[in-house]
Image (cartoon, coloured by chain):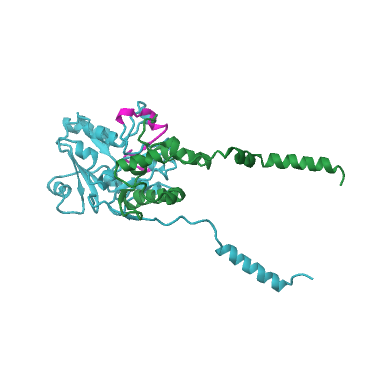
Chain colours: A cyan, B green
Amino acid sequence: MGMNKRDFLKVAGVTAIGAAIGPGKKAAAALRGQAVNNPNALTARRWAMVVDMRKCKGDCPDCITACHRAHNVPSIPNPLHEIKWIWTDHYANAFEVPPEEERLLSDEVRDKPFLVLCNHCDNPPCVRACPTQATFKRLSDGIVMMDFHRCIGCRFCMAACPYGSRSFNFGDPRKYLKEADINQDFPTRVKGVVEKCNFCSERLAAGRMPACVEACKQGVLTFGDLDDPSSEVTRLLRENYTVKRKPELGTMPMVYYIV
Amino acid sequence: MYDKAKVLAGLAVFALLFLSPILVDMVTGGSLQQPDLEPARQMARQMGNTGCVEDTAYMRANHMDMLNQWRSLVVREGWREYTAQKDGKTYEMSLTNTCLKCHSNYESFCNRCHTNNSVTPFCWDCHLTHTEEFK
């Protein structure tokens, strides 16, 4: 008595099919409501920034303070653990002037602190280096974004970025934020993630210009659509000679400087 | 069966010990604490809303999936607002700026259920709760 080979195979086959198409893991419910866009949001095909260093006196911290306040960027005294979204550097460092040629620069350019930030490259090396796609270039407007939820803190992006635009949280950043300075509307970060300038994507979505642009009273910073021939950014680029940082690397930075 | 009485007594003791957590809960009414909804309801009313973005039963069962979807939509797709099925109202898809504005009572709202279900989401490591407990 017992099952013959043919019957056994029939039962085994049906069981295997049942297991394959069976209930499995409960799938996430579909979104109940509808995702929509804020009609007041500022949109562009390609966001870009022009930094007019002729207008920047280099001695006021307005743009940096505004940015760091808006995004809860801590001020950490140890320069090795510093978090930077927008900061200043010497022209010779920012634009890789060979040391032997530094003396040939004009006094003004050589000594003035230059504003530097993430270049939101059109060909971003950080995005290629990221193993989890935590950093990615937004297809709609070219902003190089960070998804802190996905960042595993491997720091490949920091090695890949030729501009030093990325900072790593070696410790809990909340320890270096003062209660009074906290912007309650923006999250802080956590130990072990990399962060950088996000071109104020959260403010653009609410119809506001980036914090640094809004804060600068000298009109140094201009933000706009590179693909729109009538935008302020394209007008400035048409009328002035501009330079980009390390263009020879082919990263195609979207932050232009009028020196 | 040898030593019938001893074996049965042993089995009874084992069963009692094994089921003790359930029995204790049956006697004491259990440690399950419902989240305290009232502060959040009051906050919502102050802000002119009738309650949460979707109805309570749906939120209770699906908020974690919903938050994951909101996160992906906002961070990766660039969608920022949500039109609720419940009443057609539009909200910002933001844990910090929408959810936690009302649900600011972390201990009595979020943590009660999470502790009961022994889940430890790390949302609050970054997202601020709009309360004084920031450290």
Residue A179, given in percent of the width and then of the height, sits at: 33, 28
Residue B75, given in percent of the width and then of the height, sits at: 35, 48
**Total marks drawn?**
0
Q: Is residue B126 inside the magenta stretch? A: no
Q: Which residues are magenta?
A: A160-181
Residue B59 appears in view: yes
Q: Is residue A164 inside the magenta stretch? A: yes
Q: Does residue A127 lie above or below A102 as drawn?
A: below
Residue A12, given in percent of the width and then of the height, sits at: 66, 67
Residue B80 appears in view: no
Q: Nearer the viewer, residue A256 or A9?
A: A9
Residue drawn at the location 46% of the way across and 40% of the way down? B35
Q: Quadrant of the N terminus of chain A?
A: bottom right
Q: Nearer the viewer, residue A90 or A40?
A: A40
Residue A42, given in percent of the width and then of the height, sits at: 23, 49
View extreme (top): residue = A77
Residue A49 found in image quarter: top left
Residue drawn at the location 12% of the way across and 47% of the way down? A239
Q: Nearer the viewer, residue B67 or A13?
A: B67
Q: Nearer the viewer, residue B35 or A68?
A: B35
Q: Quadrant of the C terminus of chain A?
A: top left
